Image: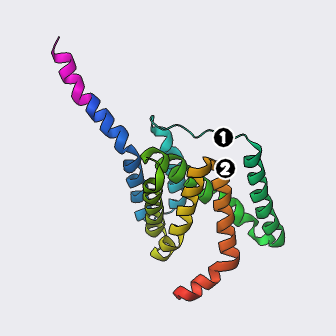
Amino acid sequence: MAEGPVLAAPAGLLSRLIARFLPWINGAVLAVGAVYDFPGRVYVLTGLMLFLPLADRHWQLPALPRTWPHYLSWTVLSLLITLLVVWQPHTANFVLGNLLLAALPEEWFFRAYFMQRIGTGWHANLAASLLFSLIHGLSRDWTTALLVFAPSLFYGWLFQRSRDLPLVTLAHALSNLVFMLFLARYVAEFWGK
């Protein structure tokens, strides 16, 4: 009879350690996927960002806010994106691809999952933003990693304040579109690309 609890303690400890460090392990898996350049890497990374959180039984999907300020903010951001696409129709494919392959999976993984699982406050936001920048540095270049760090801190702050994944996703998509339309060429000139 005494052997049962003694044997169960290490298994319980291992389970608690895995639960505590699983977000970090999932971040490391994502980083390893970003290191190697291979055909379809964007799709593999997108899949990892979408499905790794679902494998963590200690994570809960954030509730969808259902108040008029949230609906209003989603509408305003969606209208801004739509107006920019109407003004510059050639950006329509970029917006759709950006929303589905960048903004949604990145916010799902880095804010709704990783940041939420590792804690609250600025420490969690800083850790998520550093991982976000690292993944961009490994999968693209280190200039991009530097450029995405401050926006990532903003997205983290916005998510911590609102707990609104659609809001943060739309803000991310809008900022990527604004960067592409108005700032990318100046950044490329500045960095000599």
> Is 100 or 187 nearer to us in this picture?
187
| Sequence-earlier tag: 1 or 2 | 1
Point out residue 116 in the picture as x, y percentages from the top left corner.
49, 46
User: In the displayed structure, does residue 112 sit left or right of residue 57?
Assistant: right
Question: Is residue 8 rendered magenta in the image?
Answer: yes
Residue drawn at the location 50% of the way across and 39% of the way down: 54
Is 23 rendered above or below residue 1?
A: below
- The quadrant where residue 20 appears: top left
Mark 1–mark 2 distance (CA, rounded to whole Å) = 8 Å
> Is 171 or 94 nearer to us in this picture?
171
> Is 47 or 109 nearer to us in this picture?
109
The C terminus sits in image quarter: bottom right
Identify the colour scheme used: rainbow
Magenta-highlighted residues: 1-11
Mark carried by residue 166: 2
* Residue at which label 1 appears: 64
Of the residues shown, which amino acid type is indicated by label 2?
Answer: Pro
Residue 173 in view here: yes
Is 9 rendered above or below residue 34?
A: above
The N terminus sits in image quarter: top left
Regarding mark 1 in the picture, which secondary structure is present there? Answer: loop
